[in-house]
Image (cartoon, helix red, strand yellow):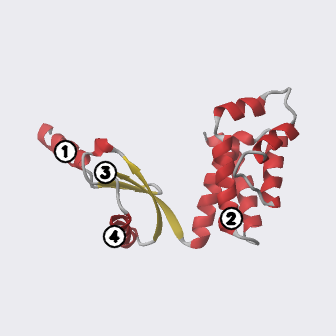
Amino acid sequence: MAELATIARPYAQAVFEAARTGDMNQWAAEVDTLAAIAAQPQLREFADNPKVAPTQVLEVFTSMPGVTLSEGVRNLLRTLIENGRLAALPEIATQFRALKNAHSGVVDAKVYSAFPIDNAQLADLMSSLERRFGRKLIASVEVEPELIGGVRVVVGDEVLDTSVKARLERMKAALVA
């Protein structure tokens, strides 16, 4: 995976520099959409087929319903296809999002919860987490019933685990020791 990250870095930096002159949120949305499409195994198989021309791959991307691309993002896609770097697109999107967030002073937070969280609960949780981590967070929530109760929050390389499952595992470790 390190190789893919290395390949993606200059592309992500170039996208970030180009996006700074325009609407960075629009760029992010378009790049994320392309990354989701490029992650599909059937499309990757089609794109990797040597009998398929790069223009055909580009046409498949741009003709999908709901996909409208600015000229800059279209040029990125064309460059990636022509250079055989389509597999790096999801990593480019991830690195671009990290650059965008760093520029905006925010960080992505992944919240794993045993139960669905409504908007009011999420707002309260995010307020507490922002004080705890000392920065503005953008949350995405994923339900994991195996946590039993509570939440596990991942912010960058930091993990805050207040789930019942984690507490039970700590108790088990203490009792066995």
Residue of label 4: 124
Are discs 3 and 1 less than 8 Å apart at CB? no
Q: Amino acid at mark 4?
A: Asp
Q: How many marks?
A: 4
Q: Is residue 55 visible?
A: yes
Q: Tell me residue 111's x, y (percent).
A: 39, 55
Residue 24, located in which quarter of the rendered image?
A: bottom right
Distance CA(mark 4)–CA(mark 3): 16 Å
Residue of label 3: 115
> Taking 21 as reference, is 8 above or below it?
above
Q: Tell me residue 8's x, y (percent).
A: 70, 49
Q: Is residue 5 visible?
A: no
Of labels 1 and 4, the one closer to you: 4
Residue of label 2: 26
Neighbours of disc 1 within 10 Å: few (<14), some (14-19), many (20+): few
Nearest to N terminus: mark 4 or mark 2? 2
Residue of label 1: 168
Q: Quadrant of the C terminus?
A: top left
Distance CA(mark 4)–CA(mark 2): 28 Å
Distance CA(mark 1)–CA(mark 2): 44 Å
Nearest to N terminus: mark 4 or mark 3? 3
Q: Nearer the viewer, residue 111 or 88?
A: 111
Distance CA(mark 3)–CA(mark 2): 32 Å
